[in-house]
Amino acid sequence: MDTETQLYLTSRFREYYEKSGSLMVVPPKDLPEREFAFTYFDREGMFRHIGFPRSEELLSHLRVNAPSHAYLSAAHYVDPDAGTMGQKGWKGTDLIFDIDADHLDVPCKEEHDRWVCRKCGETSKGKRPEQCPSCQSTTIEEEAWLCEQCIAQAKSETFKLIDILSGDFGFSRSDIDVIYTGHRGYHVKVDLPSIHPLTPSERREIVDYITGRGILLQAHGLIEQGSGRRRTIAGPGRESVGWGLRIYRSIVKMFGNGEAPLEAIANKNKVLEGMAGGRWDATKGIALKTWERLVTKAMERYGIAHIDEPVTTDIHRLIRLEGSLHGKTGFAVTKVRELESFDPFKDAVVLKSDQEINVYIERSNAFRVGENSYGPYEKVKLKLPLAAAIFFMCKGVAKVIRET
Amino acid sequence: MVKESLSTQTLPLTDLAKHFWSVQAAEYIKDKEVDLEELDNYEDVISEAESWIDSTLGTGVISPNFRRRPEEIILAYPTARMFITILGNDYVLRRFATAVSKYAGVLLENEDDAKIVLLATTPGNFGERSWQLVYQKATQTKKEVIGGRIFEWKLSFTDYVNVAQNFHDTYWKLVNRPVSGGWVYLLKPDIARLMEEAIKVRISRSGLKPSRDLPSTKGLPPSLREAVERISRRVKKRAGELQQYDIEGLGAGESAYPGCIKRILDKLNRGIGVSHNERLALVFFLSNVGKEIDDILRAFSNVPDFDVARTRYYVEHAMGMRGGGTKYKSFGCPKLQTFGLCSPQDEWCRQGKIGPKTLSGPLHFYKAKSWVLSKRKEEEKTGHS
């Protein structure tokens, strides 16, 4: 990013924090116990081990320094600004989850993401390779884009996660905070005293539960009994709970999509009625292994929430500060009250102005801000509304043109 | 009149003897205010405590002699704990914890349901936390049926993962349990098994730090001193055999690391870049000595090009958490020599042997050195060599 654009973005971010910071930025209720960290447009690296005893000091830091990204710890510490983890005095950590299109298998990434080899300049669309196919370097930069499809997939995974957290783990909906990260996904957070002491190993068990790792289908009732004519297959049904119920519901959805074995689809109503009561053999001729394969597919599609696992197990993790700006988009990190209707391309856009900004765009995909679409562009100078201009600049595909 | 605590009011003496490991039993004994001089006269208690430690070292199974008076059984437990604290041997403590917990588990499986709830929900029986455990007897009109099975027990999922994380069998994974509304539904044998594990963890973690007024062996009254000396001799006789393959206990830390690993760590601590092979050698070694992923990442955090996401990715691969799930073994000496990472300083490394055995690699070095260091520590505590 050129210096002019860095300065411009910094000034716009500063303006946001000066005018709206005290309204939009939401310091945590236990602010003095949290470690903060920031990155800036004009400096490399992350500056961490920062603590603020009061909200005013945090807001002042944002106004003065206008960071590109602002983070706080999911953990509570005795001395959050101590220089090493060992010295901070860990007290507990919120239970947090990250659902990000970065870690999801969404086909649109092949269309709109791009990677660039820092060593030889080789570039191509799609997922970043482990090493450059031309020069085998591993220093490869990723240009991640976002679109309706990425966000929709992330939202779908977030719904699955909330279903597990509320239905299985018993968290009330008011205990579960959903926060749009400002880029390609959502954080989900549970901040309860009962959760804080959980160790990394315990959080690993929770992650394994959510991702279905290690599941034994027979533990949820999918078993074969008897043989020959007396062979029966039992499985989870409507009266099951937890993963048993989830498996049953996922299979029902597969039927809805016509993805069940043909013999079962031919007798769909009878089969589904039997399954509701735990009998999976209403139609003969379908082996247990066939059901197991179908269940695995159904779980992957409708049951498992695809979370970024290390985020949950790492008790020293940093998460984004609610109300801060995301330096790759200019969008705000936004608490989501109603996930179904939340539209980040509208609801997270806070840098609004009637003013239009002159930019030069090297290359970009199409993008929507509010009700309007922009791009794709290539090697073009144009005027754009502030939010769109900021977005392309933050993405690193555009630079500001100062009028002289 | 001294008011009895609520927990002892609800368990009769014979139950306190059965559950001698419990807070309830501890409070009963505390009320009796038995000091060391008085304890020294209780031959039967000392004999019972000594037999438990013998069993711990031998079969690993203890069988309290319930022909003795209940008070003697109850007092034998803190006496045995005291002996182990004076010995200062962590391995014996953990073996004792296992033995006591196995004994407790068998009893709990057949114990009265209300007493199980009482024991599980008393703070202190499983460390600081008390369980949220609910028992609901199934009746014709009221029963919890899940997947065709009747469940009379439910445990909060946080308490469940706290214990079950120690089990390796997939059967115990939370994902294989009926979970709803924050509760894990269980059968009684599972509850007993979980309590058994929780007891083992509590005793193991209670540690060996003596209280201020506990004297060393020499300061004990005669019968107690003789008992400790007898036990100490038996422990020493069996120590090498018992500890040889005990990785868990051999956590002597960096002081037991071989020179090749220490050199890599030293470079990292000074912010000096390390080669790809040095990184692999360190990651594989640390993951095989039980380090958690975050501890391993912290070792790398000082290098100039530290990239958390990339480093985490490679560390997770090495630990078998990604890809095919293979957990990589630590490099052996021949490989380290090929990579130019071996520059022997320690006597074992120069000779390529530990005793009569060929030194195979850093992990072998670590196990052996940890044993030596723990033996040395034990000798310093007991004043015996």
Image (cartoon, coloured by chain):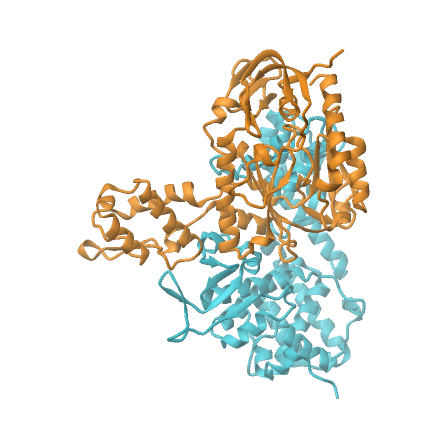
Chain colours: A orange, B cyan
Q: Is residue A56 above or below residue B133?
A: above
Quadrant showing the C terminus of chain A: top right
- At x 62% / y 18%, what residue is drawn? A397
- At x 52% / y 64%, what residue is drawn? B155
**Residue B194 appears in view:** yes
- The front one of A18 and B252 is A18
- At x 71% / y 47%, what residue is drawn? A28
* Quadrant housing residue A401: top right
Q: Is residue B182 above or below residue B372?
A: below
Q: Is residue A234 above or below residue A318?
A: below
B3 relative to A134 in the view: left or right:
right
Q: Position of residue A171 (x, y in %)?
A: 56, 55
- The front one of B93 and B23 is B23
Q: Position of residue B136 (x, y in %)?
A: 47, 72
- The front one of B298 and B263 is B298
**Residue A131 appears in view:** no
- The front one of A30 and A323 is A323
Quadrant showing the N terminus of chain A: top right
* Quadrant housing residue B50: bottom right
Q: Residue furthest bottom?
A: B1
Q: Position of residue B120 (x, y in %)?
A: 57, 69
